[in-house]
Image (cartoon, rainbow, N blue to C red):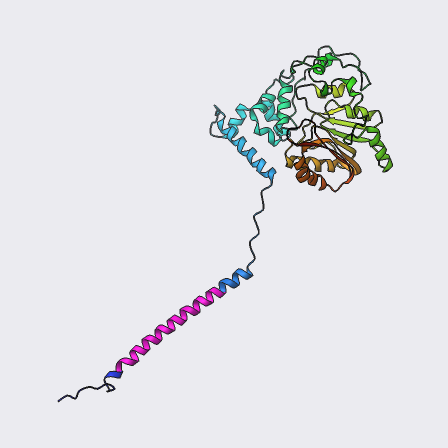
Amino acid sequence: MDRQRRPGSSAEPKAKPKMGFTMGLNMLLLLTMVATNILSLYHLSSTIQTTKKPPAPVPVPDHLLHQLNTIRATINHLTRLPPSAADSSTKAAVFTTTSPPDLLLHSQLSPIATSCHNHPDLLHRYMDYTPFSPCPPDSDELAESLILHGCHPLPRRRCFSKTPPKPTSSLSHNSFAPSLPDQNVIWHKYNCKSFSCLVRSNPKLGFNLSGEATRFMSYNDELDLPVLQLLHIAKAANSVLRLGIDVGGGTGTFAARMKLYNVTIVTTTMNLGAPYNEVVALRGLVPLHVPLQQRFPVFDGVVDLVRCGHAVNRWIPLTAMEFLLYDVDRVLRGGGYLLLDHFFSKGVDLDKLYAPLIGKLGYKKVKWATGNKANSKNAEVYLTALLQK
């Protein structure tokens, strides 16, 4: 007769080692998993702490973005041109058959300004002429439009520019002559056909030389800096004034006044609806037909004075203004002067934008005067500043 099994007999304990082994194995796996995670977290945290952050991406300069846009515009234009009859499979053939021959010839001798390719229609019209013949009648208008769009310097051409049919045989050496000869200007491209018409339409344009005779001579308020005072300031600082640039100088009155004191000033000006360049030349002065965004065609550190008149104002983009001021610094010699004459902007912009921008030059403030612009709806102010490099 089988004996009844009791608790604690030899048959029952056989299951306990198996259960204990399974639990031990699970605990070992759990500890291994925890240890592995802890090591992974430690490695990750130490890697984050020791690894340097990647440098911030370098912003693409504006001029590179402009060049990229120029390339895109040129490619888009070339793809829109009709294909060549000889070979429509290549863009070169398309360009050859549609571009004026002298444009292609000039591009082999000298590079065409990048901005010119942004306006291929204007550029092609400007270069579409018969060599060794009179230039097309709309040449001046096309040239002015291209320059204002940044296409400068313009490509050279092999045609004869039109001249006035019956110019005066002699010109006055007086820069403040009572009148200007109408017959020395080609008027067909302007609304007015005489200087008297220009004076009647707007006496402040600078074509009334009798009225211009008193400019830069009187002191009416803190914004004025008469020429005699400017010369006195330079003399007191042992800084001679001999050569200068008048940026956006209109009809050249500042240069004419300085000429009377043996100071040579060249005037940058554009023919915006009136013959400004012609008048500067008729007054016996040197006009430079260059836009505000163009680099001054002057060597580094050679001029004593740069004046920026009404043409330099808040309508110029801030970045373009910065490039303009640093180009002024490039051409000014040590001890030279920058004259901001009646620069206007919003009052808040002068304090927050333009004053810090001017301050970057590190020039000595010889004069800094501000005043409210009369009848301004935008809280505009004037600034006249004389700064010495």
Q: Is residue 66 above or below residue 46?
A: above
- Horizontal side of residue 358 vs 27, given as left or right: right
How many discs mark residues in the rendered view? 0
- Horizontal side of residue 350 vs 243, given as left or right: left
Q: Is residue 76 magenta?
A: no
Q: Is residue 21 above or below residue 77?
A: below
Q: Is residue 24 magenta?
A: yes
Task: Give the magenta part as a residue range.
Answer: 14-42
- Which quarter of the figure has residue 314? top right
At horizontal 17% and vertical 87% (from top left) the residue drawn is 4
Q: Between residues 353 and 94, which one lies in front from this camera angle?
A: 353
Q: Between residues 329 and 134, which one lies in front from this camera angle?
A: 329
- Which quarter of the figure has residue 108? top right
- Horizontal side of residue 40 vs 21, given as left or right: right
The kind of secondary structure the magenta stretch mainly shows is: helix
Q: Quadrant of the C terminus?
A: top right
Horizontal and vertical percent position of residue 138: 62, 17
Residue occupying the far top of the picture: 166
- Horizontal side of residue 232 vs 14, given as left or right: right
Horizontal and vertical percent position of residue 206: 73, 20
Q: Between residues 308 and 75, which one lies in front from this camera angle?
A: 308
Horizontal and vertical percent position of residue 249: 73, 26
Q: Quadrant of the N terminus?
A: bottom left
Horizontal and vertical percent position of residue 141: 63, 20
